[in-house]
Image (cartoon, rainbow, N blue to C red):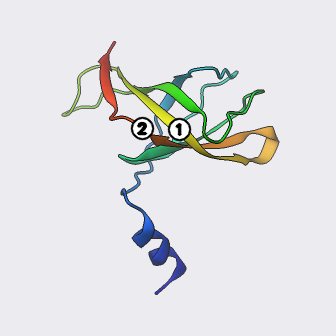
Amino acid sequence: MSAASAIDERRRHRRLGLQLTVRSVQGLSWAMPPRTSDISSGGMFFVADTAKSPSVGQELQFELTLPPGEGYWPRTSSILGRGQVVRVAEMPNGRQGVAIKFVQPLSLGLT
């Protein structure tokens, strides 16, 4: 068994490489809004350039932008959620990678 398949077998939720804009995260601010690089029904990962890094274990409220798409949703909307930080990683150029585990189901907010 390869290392990649062993990791995939340990994951509880299938990950999608969706790049959704992180519109806001309670307590964090940045010059340019980050985008998710990885999201599943259990959590998400994004990279941000923020002066204040979140702490592992910290609970955060967040809002993601869901763009319109032909055939499935006619307008821009938001995905609202609450999650717990499970990992913060130093990235190049002083950025932080933040992994969040969802602590409640995501909800759709219309804008």
Q: Please, what is the three-letter code of the amino acid marked with disc 1?
A: Gln
Compared to residue 106, the image places residue 63 above or below, namely above
Q: Residue at 47% across / 40% down in the picture?
A: 19
Helix, strand or loop status at disc 1:
strand
Mark count:
2
Q: Position of residue 64 (x, y in %)?
A: 45, 27
Badge 1, how many Cα within 10 Å: few under 14, some, many 20+?
many
Q: Residues within 10 Å of mark 2 (few under 14, many from 20)?
A: some
Q: Amino acid at mark 2?
A: Val
> Is 71 on the left-hand or right-hand side of 61?
left
Residue visible at 32% across and 35% down? Answer: 105
On residue 84, which mark appears? 1
Marks 1 and 2 sit apart, C-alpha to C-alpha, by 7 Å
Rendered location of residue 82, percent (x, y): 45, 30
Side (left or right) of 14 relative to 84: left
- Locate residue 106, reporting x and y percent: 34, 32
Residue toward you, 65 or 72: 65
Circle 2 residue: 103
Assess whether mark 2 and mark 1 are in contact (beta carbons under 8 angstroms): yes
Q: Is residue 80 above or below residue 105?
A: above
Q: Quadrant of residue 15?
A: bottom left
